[in-house]
Structure formats: structure tokens, C-alpha cells
Amino acid sequence: MQIDFGKTAGDYAKHRVGFPEAFFQRIFADGLAQAGQPALDLGTGTGTVARGLALRGCMVTGLDPSAALLAQAAELDRAAGVQVLQVQSTVEAAEFPSGSFDLITAGQCWHWFDRPRAAALALRWLRPGGRLVIAHFDWLPLAGNMVEDTERLIRAHNPAWSMSDGTGLYPAWLKDVREAGFDDLRTFSFDLGVPYTHEDWRGRIRASAGVGASLDPAAVARFDTELADVLARRHPDPMQVPHRVWVLSAVSPG
């Protein structure tokens, strides 16, 4: 399945809400991030993690291969009154001097990378004692809920999509960072509901890998029409969509 989130940059910027305030409160309260740190946000997309760090005083570089997503990020950054240095590149092809950053984040994107190489590069780019924070903010398919119905519909329209039935937990990522040489691994998770209107949920799903980032426009339109019908019949508007935040942090030794 060929994925290009740039194809859905408009929906991505408008409807993907990004990590919640509680995520940022927690990582700063726990000392995983601190104001004044030079930080690199991998797979930054429309910049929700980078912008959250910049709003709290970090000096942030956002890295992403999609020019369309970075353009959306720049507009959102200007509206928020922050500056993020943008670098267009894949993680694997990026070049930064060793020890450039105190913090490297990867929000909702670690699975798209060559994970062993990404972990090794993060270790190189962090100063000794710097921290890698890998985070996910995933919807939760539960029996009979709107997520289960939505995932069933995505599979019907895109049989190549294989990311359904997730738990929002990623134990394999611990092996990635441990084998790269990181120390002091820690994880935490918490659940919360995210309010969505039918319109916004449809936009959020159009901006997902299994729909707008991989299907042609006509197929996306057919999917969207069917999703609108399912939501209207089964799920009152607005909805509370269950999500899980999961965080892995690890420290560069030295």
C-alpha cells in the first residue's frame, strides 16, 4: 500500500486534532521535556507535537518528507505565534551534527520509519543524557462503537490496509531503542475521549493512511459517502471517540 499523506494535507491539518493538552502537561511535569531545550520532531506532519513543544519554550526543528504537510504546519505555526525550523527529508536521509539536540520526539510515526536506523540516528543526534520520546495517540475500536464500524468500512474499501484492531500499545518499540543503546526506558499510557462531530470524524478518517493517503479521489468520495450513512444510522452526533495516549521515553547514555 503506497502512502502519501501529502494527498490529504488539507483534511490532515483541519481534522487531525493532534496530541491532547494532557500529553504535553505530563511530559513536562515528568521532566521528559523542558523549556529551552533544542528539540527535533521526527515525522512532524502538520506540526502538532513540534508546535506544542514550541509553545512551551523549546527550540524546535520539524522533520518531514512531505512539502504539503510542512506548508500546512507553517500556516498553523504562524496562527499560533510560534516558529519551528522546518527540514524536508525522510528520517533515514536526514543529516544533523552529533549531539545537536536535548530532545527528539516521534509522534504517531515510528511505525513508518526504518526503525533500527531511526533509533540509531536518534542516539547519534542526541547529546549524552538527551531523551527520545516516542508517542502515539490512537483511536480505540471497541465492540459496536464508531471506531469499529469505521475500521470495518476501511477494510471493505481498502483490503490492503492492515492497521485495524489496535490497542494503542507498542511494546516492540522498546526493543528498538534498547538495541540501539538507549538507557532508562519508561512507558506510560492513559485513555480519554475526544469529541468529534460526524463531519470532523469523516475528515479525520479521510486524512488516515487507509483512506485519503492511499486511495484515489473517487474511491475516497465513495468511502466518505458510506461512512456518513453509517454514522447517521448508528452513532448520534456529536460523538465521544475513545483514544489512548502511549509514551515511551529513553535516555542517551553518557
Image (cartoon, grey):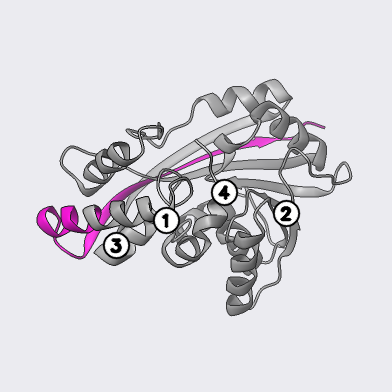
Residue marked by disc 1: 217
Name above or below for residue 163 compared with residue 50.
above
| Of residues 126 and 146, the one drawn nearer to the viewer in this rendering | 146
Name above or below for residue 97 compared with residue 171.
below
Seen in the image, is 2 located left or right of residue 141?
right
CB under 8 Å between discs 2 and 1:
no
Residue marked by disc 2: 39
| Of residues 150 and 187, the one drawn nearer to the viewer in this rendering | 150
Give the image location of residue 156, x and y in percent: 27, 38
| Label 2: which secondary element | strand
- Residue 245 visible in rendering: yes
Disc 2 to disc 4, C-alpha distance: 17 Å
Range of residues picked out in magenta: 227-254
Q: Residue furthest left?
A: 233
Give the image location of residue 185, x and y in percent: 61, 30
Seen in the image, is 9 located left or right of residue 237?
right
